[in-house]
Amino acid sequence: MSERKPGWKQIPRGGLILEAGNAAQYLTGDWRSLRPVWDPEACSHCLFCWVYCPDAAILVAEGKMKGINLDFCKGCGICANQCPRTGALTMVTEGSVTAQAGS
């Protein structure tokens, strides 16, 4: 006979307590249905995308955008909507493009 799992009344208030700083362990990028595609030639490196990205998925080094961390990007499109340069960031259906350098 299988062991019975505790019901909701046996779970302490607040549920399970997770250790702080564990977000890097949970790759959440596979949730998305749209993905950003970055065109480095069209990018002005204004970093609006970095400022507005709720998942810190925009990679920046030496004050310039270097790509997108697709392990954590959930495809919300905020980066593309905030980008002032037409075509620097576009949202496409996941699976419609192959992985590219920098994205």
Image (cartoon, grey):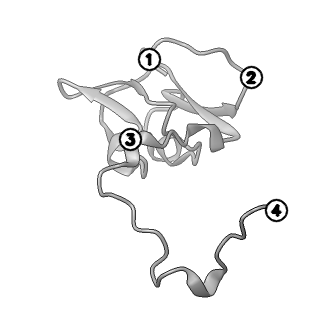
Identify the mark nearer the N-term, 4 or 3.
4
Amino acid type at circle 1 is: Gly
Cα separation between marks 2 and 4: 47 Å
Q: Position of residue 4 (x, y in %)?
A: 72, 70
Q: Is residue 48 visible?
A: yes
In primary-sequence order, the first of circles 2 and 4 is: 4
Q: Which residue is mark 4?
A: 1
Residue at label 2? Answer: 96
Foreground: 46 or 19?
19
What's the residue type where badge 2 is placed? Ser
Q: Would residue 57 be found to the left or right of residue 51 on screen?
A: right
Quarter of the image for residue 56 reads top left
* 3 and 12: which is toward the camera: 3
Which SS class for mark 4? loop
Measure the C-alpha gap from mark 2 to mark 1: 17 Å
Which is nearer the N-term, disc 1 or disc 4? 4
Query: Extreme left residue here?
Result: 62
What residue appears at the point 17 percent right and 23 percent down from the top-left corner? 62
Tell me how far mark 4 sits from mark 3, CA to CA.
37 Å
**Residue type marked 3:** Ala
| Structural distance between the alpha carbons of marks 2 and 3 | 27 Å
Please indicate whether residue 94 sits to the left or right of residue 29 in the image.
right
- Sequence-wise, the earlier of marks 2 and 3 is 3
Residue 56 visible in the picture: no
Contact (Cβ within 8 Å) of mark 1 with mark 3: no
Q: Earlier in the sequence, mark 2 or mark 1?
A: 2
